[in-house]
Image (spheres, grey):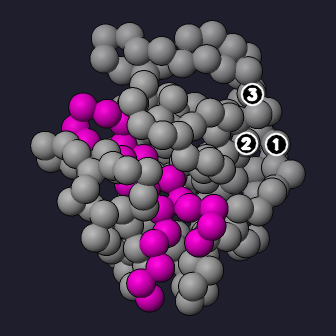
Amino acid sequence: MGAFGAHIGVPMNVILICKGCGKPVTGTLRHYDEADASVEFGKVNGRLVPFKGTFAKGDIIPNSSTEGGFIPKGVAFKASVSVQHFLHLQTDELPHQYWLNLDDIKDHILRNQNWEKGYGCCGVIPGHNKPNRKCICGVDIGYEFSECYYEKVFVPSADTTRWTHA
């Protein structure tokens, strides 16, 4: 995925693109880089909250009260840890972690053959470290985490997607 020099408080607009066909995977998003913040998270009463750290006005902080996922809609959040580490999952970690709200994924991004290889009762946690979402062109483009007992998030694949300025 492309490297952007955005800083907290000075985000830029970006769009995620499928490398296979060039179609947008998302609409316009604001890019934020967690590396610019000093934040640690923990669960309090079942909700993810900032434990400690320094925050500037306009910081994007993952929060389980956010509709459609714990990343606010309209944000491309470049995380400093893998979503698997953050959610305390016992799976292989995915590289190149950007976290997106599920509501920001376009309608032509479909479930692929790996969807059923994941686990969960009313959503999915990807299994076998393989993408479970694909573009309409057939290219596997990312990982949906949507199981009810975990935070909801989409992690795009660095191999099959790219970022571009909006």
At numbered mark 3, what does the secondary structure look like: helix, strand or loop? loop
Residue topped by disc 3: 37
34 with respect to 98 (left or right): right
Res 97 seen here: yes
The amino acid pointed to by label 2 is Asp
Q: Position of residue 123 (x, y in %)?
A: 22, 49
Kind of residue at disc 3 = Ala
Write the residue at 27% across / 61% down.
115
Q: Which residue has dot 2 on it?
A: 33
Q: Give the left or right position of residue 166, taking residue 128 as reference.
A: right
**Image quadrant where one finds the C terminus:** bottom right
Q: Quadrant of residue 103?
A: bottom left
Q: Which residue corresponds to the image point at 74% horizontal and 27% vertical from the top-left?
A: 37
Kindly state the secondary structure of the residue where label 2 is placed. Answer: strand
Q: Is residue 74 above or below residue 92?
A: below
The residue at 33%/49% (across/down) is 127
Asked if residue 117 lies in the magenta stretch, the reply is no
Q: Quote the CA–CA distance across marks 2 and 3.
A: 8 Å
Residue 143 forms part of the magenta stretch: yes
Residue 39, label in figure: none
Could you say which is closer to the camera, residue 63 or residue 94? 94
Q: Are marks 2 and 1 in contact (CB under 8 Å)?
A: yes
Disc 2/disc 1 C-alpha distance (Å): 6 Å
Q: How many marks?
A: 3
Q: Name the residue carrying label 1.
A: 7
**Mark nearer the N terminus (2 vs 1):** 1
Residue 134 pos. (x, y %)? 40, 73
- Residue range highlighted in magenta: 137-160
Q: Nearer the viewer, residue 111 or 104?
A: 111
Q: Is residue 117 left or right of residue 133?
A: left
